[in-house]
């Protein structure tokens, strides 16, 4: 099949890598949730060979991910697994989780299910990094994010830019402490929690 292509994966990948490199220095096994095309997985796994990178997404995305992963042929990039956060989770434990551009696409019910899934799949010292646009107390950090939120909600009323405070409550319930909130290009952020 032709490899699917997501422009959003290319835009900030170098800036994201800079943060992930310092955050995942001591991590080994990483689960990426909602990997989409697996473009990020290929780029990050190549740049961080000490990480065993496991990408995942809903079943519909698996063929596209396989196309990227097969072509990359990296020893530390595993075949993708099906993971719909609302369904059954793998029984494997990970010491790092990364997800980009996902929590504003998922319904809030799915976001809650994702954090609930972390309760069993994270090791005792795990790190979680979420990349994307976020709000503070319901307030947009830019005009363009406000317009993006409107566009998201017209497409799917259950989607929308999430509040950092609400995500943090879910994280705290999993024993995760917010360690860093990095400002990223184009009004995005990376939120990093640690067990
Ligand atoms: C905008 S894409 C982001 C893909 C990629 N991470 C990126 O940065 O381009 C959102 C992704 O969320 C995934 N997604 C939506 N609902 C999901 C769910 N319930 N469980 C797992 N993934 C989900 C979609 O399949 C899609 O790949």
Image: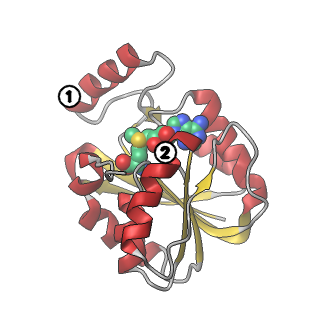
Name the residue tied to disc 1: 143
- Please say whether residue 174 is visible from this viewpoint: no
Q: Secondary structure at mark 2?
A: helix
Q: Nearer the viewer, mark 1 or mark 2?
A: 2
Numbered circles on residues, count: 2
- In the image, taking residue 96 as reference, residue 133 lies left or right, namely left
Earlier sequence position, callout 1 versus callout 2: 2
Relative image position of residue 14 (x, y in whole percent): 25, 67
Q: Determine crowd level at label 2: few under 14, some 14-19, many 20+ residues with C-alpha closer than 10 A.
A: some
Question: Which residue corresponds to the image point at 75% horizontal and 65% vertical from the top-left?
Answer: 92
Relative image position of residue 18 (x, y in whole percent): 31, 72
- Please say whether residue 70 is visible from this viewpoint: yes
Q: Secondary structure at mark 1?
A: helix
As drawn, 131 above or below 138: below
Relative image position of residue 12 (x, y in whole percent): 25, 57
Q: Quadrant of residue 108?
A: top right
Instruction: Kindly report the distance in space between the C-alpha atoms of the residues bearing marks 1 and 2.
Output: 31 Å
Q: How is the image coloured?
A: secondary structure
Question: Which residue corresponds to the image point at 28% horizontal and 25% vertical from the top-left?
Answer: 146
Q: Nearer the viewer, residue 145 or 114?
A: 114
Relative image position of residue 44 (x, y in whole percent): 38, 70
Q: Nearer the viewer, residue 175 or 108?
A: 108
Q: Nearer the viewer, residue 77 or 171?
A: 77
Name the residue tied to disc 2: 61
- In the image, taking residue 12 as reference, residue 178 lies left or right, namely right
Question: Which residue corresponds to the image point at 55% horizontal and 52% vertical from the top-left?
Answer: 33
């Amino acid at each position: 099949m032709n490899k699917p292509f997501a422009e959003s994966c290319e835009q900030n990948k170098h800036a994201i890598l800079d943060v992930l490199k310092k955050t995942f220095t001591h991590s080994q096994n990483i689960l990426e949730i909602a990997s989409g095309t697996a473009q990020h997985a290929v780029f990050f796994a190549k740049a961080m060979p000490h990480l065993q990178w496991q990408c995942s997404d809903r079943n519909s995305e698996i063929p596209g991910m396989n196309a990227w992963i097969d072509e990359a042929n990296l020893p530390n990039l595993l075949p993708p697994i099906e993971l719909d956060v609302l369904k059954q989770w793998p029984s494997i434990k990970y010491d790092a989780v990364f997800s980009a551009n996902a929590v504003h696409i998922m319904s809030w019910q799915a976001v809650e299910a994702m954090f609930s899934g972390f309760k069993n799949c994270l090791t005792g010292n795990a790190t979680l990094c979420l990349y994307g646009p976020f709000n503070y107390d319901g307030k947009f950090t830019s005009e363009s994010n406000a317009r993006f939120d409107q566009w998201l909600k017209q497409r799917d009323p259950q989607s929308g830019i999430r509040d950092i405070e609400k995500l943090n409550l879910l994280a705290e319930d999993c024993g995760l402490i917010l360690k860093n909130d990095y400002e990223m290009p184009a009004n995005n952020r990376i939120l990093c929690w640690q067990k």
